[in-house]
Amino acid sequence: MSLFRYSGLSTKVKAMRGRLLSQEQFREMSDLHSVPEVLSYLKKLPSYGKVLADKDETHLHRGAAEALIKQSLYYDFGKLYRFADLEQRVFLGDYFMRYEVIFLKNVLRYLFDSQEDRTDIDLSAYQAVFERHSSMDPHVLMGAETVEGLIGLLQDTPYGKALAVVNKAGGANLFAYETALDMLFFKQLWLDVKKHLKKQDLQVIQRSAGLEADTLNIQWIYRAKKYYCMAPADIYAFLIPIHYRLSTEQVKQLVEAENAKEYMDVLQQTSYGRHLEESSYVQLEKICGRLMDKVHQANLRTAGYSAACLDTYLYEKEQEVNKVIKVIECVRYGLPAERIKEYLASAPVQAKDEWDKTSA
């Protein structure tokens, strides 16, 4: 049944994956000398030509350029939705909450960066897809002048309630607001997929979402302790309440570790410990990212005719967009090409087990 239901969609995804940027294309972008050159390069590619086609890349400021790049993700979501059957559309509808969160994070970043100009940001692609899949209006939300104003615009939504709790506590930073949105997303997605998906579809989504929840919690606990000196009681409030391969006791030990060494010692004893090589946050973030790559690849390899084809493509496209934006930032700040290539390079993780054998 899954083979029949997903055969057409799987073929569509395979074709779209073939248009994802290659490592060679990222290396070529790294060799460019200015942001307009990078945008001109992207304009010639099918994935980004549509969003950049009528834009003058020499006059696009950073915020406007990044917004356009991110719109390619929404275009691709729309393509998959139009091709999906009714049951697959239910999952995509649940998944769209992720894009609402991404958009709200963008608005929050503009509000926390008073120097960022929002006047030239083209929201047309956001508007088109949000009109179909969301009750939020991107133009109205992007017009918020303060965090309190944004919360007011969202007052009748779960997002408004989540952000209001953070705001009421006082002294909140961008990290606090973003983690509140992520926590809300994962809680809701976990409930929705249990309600709407069956058997193999449910298994592969719980596998990828569960791993992401674990790895985000691992990183957030480390950041909260090392960079924000947060007390354990405050850290618990920001954690995603999903324990996939981390037990409740292991999470407790990580939160209450007294220093970075104790934290890493505890982490080494978890199922993720075998993947750890170094104790720096940069290495931890990179390793968690590679684990996410591996679980999506394994899902697609072992369950290609399931929701895995949708989940994996949307994950890979989101990672590509993030890397493109990172190249733009690096070129903008004049980093040498070799440094950019080093940053983008991702050496394989020495995994000792087969992720595709993991059951949800």
Image (spheres, rainbow, N blue to C red):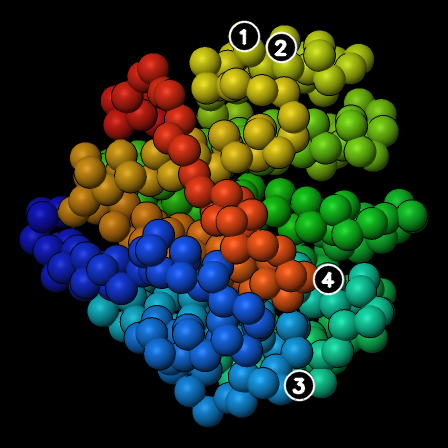
What amino acid is labelled 4 in the image?
Arg
Q: Left or right of 234: which side holds 46?
A: left
- Identify the disc placed on residue 149: none
Instruction: Please identify the residue farthest to the right as the structure is shown.
Output: 170
Question: For the residue labelled by badge 3, is the local secondary structure a helix, a strand or a loop?
Answer: loop
Residue 157 shows in the view: no
Gap between marks 3 and 2 measured at Cα = 48 Å
In the image, what residue occupies the spot 34% across and 15% down? 352
Q: Nearer the viewer, residue 333 or 301?
A: 333
Question: x%, y% of residue 227?
Answer: 80, 33
Question: For the residue labelled by badge 2, is the local secondary structure a helix, a strand or a loop?
Answer: helix
Q: Residues within 10 Å of mark 4 (few under 14, many from 20)?
A: some
Question: x%, y% of residue 248?
Answer: 59, 17
Gap between marks 2 and 4 measured at Cα = 33 Å
Q: Left or right of 357: which side holds 257?
A: right
What amino acid is labelled 1 in the image?
Gln
Q: Which residue is mark 2?
A: 266
Looking at the image, is mark 4 or mark 1 earlier in the sequence?
Answer: 4
Gap between marks 4 and 1 measured at Cα = 36 Å
Q: Which residue is mark 4?
A: 109
Looking at the image, is mark 4 or mark 3 earlier in the sequence?
Answer: 4
Q: Residues within 10 Å of mark 2 (few under 14, many from 20)?
A: some
Q: Which residue is mark 1?
A: 269
Gap between marks 4 and 3 measured at Cα = 16 Å
In the image, what residue occupies the spot 65% across and 73% down? 63
